[in-house]
Image (spheres, rainbow, N blue to C red):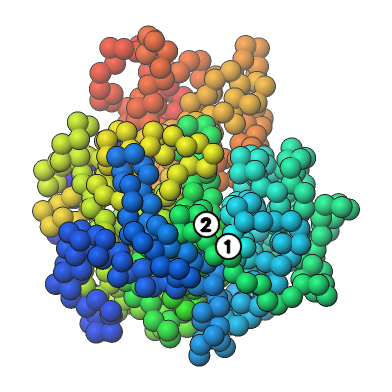
Amino acid sequence: MTYAKASASSAVSISASEEQRIVFPPKRVQERAQIRDYGHYRELYELSINYPTVFWALQSRLVDWMKPFHKVLGGGLENGDHSWYEGGRLNASYNCADRHAATWRRDKAAIIWQGEDENDTRTLTYYELYIQVCRFANVLKKHGVRRGDRVTIYLPLIPEAAVAMLACARIGAVHNVVFGGFSAESLGERIRDSGSKLLITADAGKRRGELIPLKEYADRALESCPEVESCIVVRHTGAPAGLIGGRDSWWHEEMRQADIFSVCLPEEMDSCDPLFILYTSGSTGKPKGVVHSTGGYLVYAALTTRYVFDIRDDDIFWCTADIGWITGHSYVLYGPLLLGGTTLMFEGLPNYPRPDRFWQVAEKFRVSIFYTAPTVIRSLMRESEDWVYRHDLGSLRILGSVGEPINPDVWMWYYRVVGRERCAVVDTYWQTETGGIIVAPLPGAIPAKPGSAALPFFGIKPAVVDRDGRECEPGGAGQLVIEEPWPGLMSGVFGEPGRFKQNYLTAYPGKYFTGDGAAADEDGYLWLLGRVDDVLNVSGHRLSTAEIESAIVNHPSVAEAAVVGFPHEIKGEAVCAYVIVRSGVKADQELKDQIRQRVRGIIGPIACPDRIHIVRELPKTRSGKIMRRVLRKISSGEYENFGDLAALSDPGLISELIEEAAGA
Ligand code: PRX
């Protein structure tokens, strides 16, 4: 059996022989796992599906409640009005800091931070984290931030990012973290859309020894955000920050003021109150503000961390994601801290200054749980294995992967070379919208099949369906839906009440549509096959073709653009743009450079097209719709079997496009 990838990109094509490979949990992992056999997983899974309210009522004990809830689940996927733990009151920062600071964990490391420079390290114990969070919460209050207000955070991966997020949560403000790799324009759009009144940024970030002028970008963004009254700036690199009087202030100066106390009572939040907004790309040109509510999200983040990573008190948990993505929210910050774990934050890159930087950091801090993305593994795989073998990675126990399908060869390399066949590899499938992992092999209980994310997590009822909503036979490729709500599911799209239902619940009424293609094999293992919509996944980062197209046509010389993905060895998928220029414009390299510059400026470097083809015309139907599947095929180097081309208005165009693409 072969599962061909359903949409644009690359990495997965699973042949029968690979599919049959099964890797059992290593003994040393299994012996100490919290769930250590398949039967136990199955029992809990059945309970979670057949008696969801009982199951989720039991799991709610992972967090401390200020007032008990009276209903586990209200509403559902029919209307998108699902709400978890109604009536319950709690505070996220209390759960991540206070309750541990009050126990023997007071002096345990909550956050270990390693900067890009080897000598830059910091540790925050639970007690120190608690104090910092209280103080910064008081700073926010002093700046007029109140319950329900939005605060945008645009920071490098430094401990202040965690402190700022928890301080928002403490006073009931909604954090909106924007990845530091986004441009000024993207930042401005997200600040405006969220209606934030305060911005937290840094003088600069660091990347390969160079400075990323975050404050400069923030200043530019704020030019179009008049509602932002204050901007608090972390001094991180010492780069000039150009504070603007009346609006900007230094974090460290704010924190040491005499009127800033180390005590700040946590706000009692309703379980359904929003905890954060996180913007993500959909299939339209405008990013969506995904909203997660407090109670359900926290319980789900805690439970998935507990079982998928099998975290214990003596673990050092390193999730390499930036805090600006959902992976950073759920598995750098909330999951590990809710459970009193130690989370490692690393500011740098996997291959700077040398290709063994990740392994050197893992060795230095005796990391036991390591969670990264296939694109990172692929890029490190290209280097000599010696870089890995040079380090003692004996502390590792669990290796996670997230962000895109992991090719079986890459999986095996991770297992063999990094894990030395003594660690469990967990391929975790989920999305910004799902709040936490929804499909993964539990490391001590579920045998892995390299290339498959394995089985659903507790409470997740997946189905692979065809276009008419009929369940596919085992092995048949279809679209992945989830049939019942779970606590991690987003509560809505910020500021657009009908959009959640419209976007996710209407394609298959009453079911959550993931936008991903998948196939389930005879054992129920899920094989993810990539997006079926116009969302690209470049190095595990989600990008919308429509957003990139609108950035390209923003260039005055461009008349029209179509963007598709194509397979890329390291990135998984890369961006290819077909561009029509205005008459009289010279289609040269300089123009292509300018277009790239434009995309960087409007979205950020991650969206920059790898290939730009300047063409006479785009393949369109007679009604003017761009035939993207034709462009996808051509970009992927497939020059035949285009399927039905009867609708194509200009049949002669295909050979011209092929010639242009092949010459690139
Ligand atoms: O296509 C799936 C892919 O990443 C998408 C979600 O992207 P985002 O919301 O940015 O969140 C990424 C981190 C959770 C999904 O729709 N994806 C994520 N993990 C996997 C995956 N595809 C296959 N296997 C995975 N393990």
Q: Is residue 594 above or below residue 141?
A: above
Q: Quadrant of residue 412?
A: bottom left
Q: Is residue 54 above or below residue 215?
A: below
Question: Crowding near pointer 1: few (<14 within 10 Å), some, many (20+)?
Answer: many
Q: Quadrant of residue 64?
A: bottom left
Image position of 495 (left or right of 657): right
Q: Which residue in the protein does label 1 denote? A: 169
Amino acid type at mark 1: Ala
Residue 402: x %, y % from top left: 39, 58
Residue 397: x %, y % from top left: 35, 78
Residue 26: x %, y % from top left: 24, 78
Q: Residue at x 26, y 49 (%)?
A: 484
Q: Quadrant of residue 445?
A: bottom left
Disc nearer the start of the sequence (1/2): 1
Q: Residue at x 54, y 85 (%)?
A: 102
Residue 149: x %, y % from top left: 64, 51
Q: Furthest-right residue in view?
A: 245
User: Element under label 1?
Assistant: helix
Image position of 227 (left or right of 107): right
Of residues 372 and 264, the one drawn nearer to the viewer in this rendering:
264
Amino acid type at mark 2: Leu
Could you tell me how far apart the alpha carbons at marks 1 and 2 are, in whole angstroms?
A: 7 Å
- Number of numbered labels in the structure image: 2
Q: Residue at x 26, y 66 (%)?
A: 55
User: Element under label 2?
Assistant: strand
Viewer can see residue 509: yes
- Assess whether mark 2 and mark 1 are in contact (beta carbons under 8 angstroms): yes
Q: Which residue in the protein does label 2 denote? A: 275
